[in-house]
């Protein structure tokens, strides 16, 4: 990992607990934790918020996953995109659709409601946000007030997480590849890497 801040050693009782928990959930302790370990209070507080976000249940879990993955893809956070694809697999969600999120506009696997959720997530990530009254009204009808508020809050939290990771130079740690998932689909408009 080529983070902009060298990783600190994850130590102490809190460090031991974090390592144990992440190994149980992810099979390893992410290197990125060492970057955030320089400010343990922020690390612990963000983790606490993330756990609370995961406990929300007004929005369908597949829609929630697609939304945060779309936000991560739009912002360019490979860590968040990979992690959420991996977690979709672990939660038994629709992996085929999760895999297609980075190219959702070109893919034919998404329903109209899923497409509106993905569009909303991307629109929230723009500077300034480009969410329209029409899109919000459609999603209010699709998801209800509580569902739309949860969608908005989940994408807002992903904006915090993804933008922080990108700014700190935290990249994918290949969780999805480690469990044998097919690589995430790439948009047709994505630049092709040179083989030279």
Image: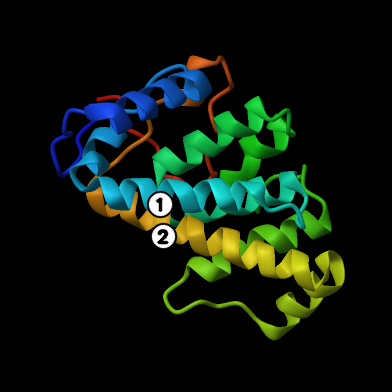
Residue at horizontal 29 percent and vertical 28 percent from the top: 13
Residue at horizontal 24 percent and vertical 49 percent from the top: 168
Image location (x, y in percent) of residue 100: 64, 39
Rendered view: 139 above or below 58: below
* Residue sitting nearer the eye, 92 or 130: 92
User: What secondary structure is marked by label 1?
Assistant: helix
Q: In which quadrant of the rendered image does the C terminus lie?
A: top left
Image location (x, y in percent) of residue 87: 59, 32
Nearest to viewer (mark 2 / mark 1): 1
The residue most toward the left is 6
Image location (x, y in percent) of residue 155: 56, 60
Asked whether the beta carbons under mark 2 and mark 1 sit within 8 Å of each other, the answer is yes
Residue at horizontal 45 percent and vertical 79 percent from the top: 128
Label 2 and label 1: CA atoms lie apart by 9 Å
For residue 182, the mark is none
| Residue 41 shown left or right of residue 71 in the figure | left
The residue indicated by pointer 1 is: 46
Local packing at callout 2 (Cα closer than 10 Å; few below 14, some 14-19, many 20+) is: few
The residue most toward the bottom is 133
User: In this orientation, does residue 194 appear?
Assistant: no
User: In this orientation, does residue 24 appear?
Assistant: yes
Q: In which quadrant of the rendered image does the N terminus lie?
A: top left
Upstream in sequence: badge 2 or badge 1: 1
Residue at horizontal 56 percent and vertical 29 percent from the top: 86
| Residue 97 shown left or right of residue 142 in the figure | left
The residue most toward the right is 141
The residue indicated by pointer 2 is: 160
Image location (x, y in percent) of residue 130: 55, 78
User: What secondary structure is marked by label 2?
Assistant: helix
Rendered view: 127 above or below 133: above
């Amino acid at each position: 990992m080529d983070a902009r801040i060298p990783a600190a050693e994850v130590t102490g009782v809190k460090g031991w607990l974090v390592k144990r928990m992440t190994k149980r959930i992810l099979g390893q302790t992410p290197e990125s934790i060492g970057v955030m370990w320089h400010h343990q209070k922020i690390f612990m507080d963000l983790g606490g918020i993330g756990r609370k976000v995961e406990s929300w249940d007004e929005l369908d879990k597949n829609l929630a996953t697609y939304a945060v993955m779309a936000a991560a893809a739009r912002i360019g956070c490979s860590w968040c995109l990979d992690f959420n694809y991996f977690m979709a697999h672990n939660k038994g969600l629709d992996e085929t659709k999760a895999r297609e999120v980075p190219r959702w506009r070109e893919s034919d696997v998404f329903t109209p409601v899923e497409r509106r959720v993905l569009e909303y997530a991307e629109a929230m990530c723009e500077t300034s946000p480009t969410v329209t009254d029409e899109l919000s009204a459609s999603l209010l009808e699709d998801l209800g007030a509580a569902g739309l508020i949860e969608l908005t809050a989940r994408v807002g939290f992903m904006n915090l997480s993804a933008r922080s990771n990108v700014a700190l130079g935290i990249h994918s740690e290949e969780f999805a590849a480690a469990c044998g998932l097919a690589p995430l689909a790439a948009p047709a408009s994505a630049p092709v890497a040179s083989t030279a």
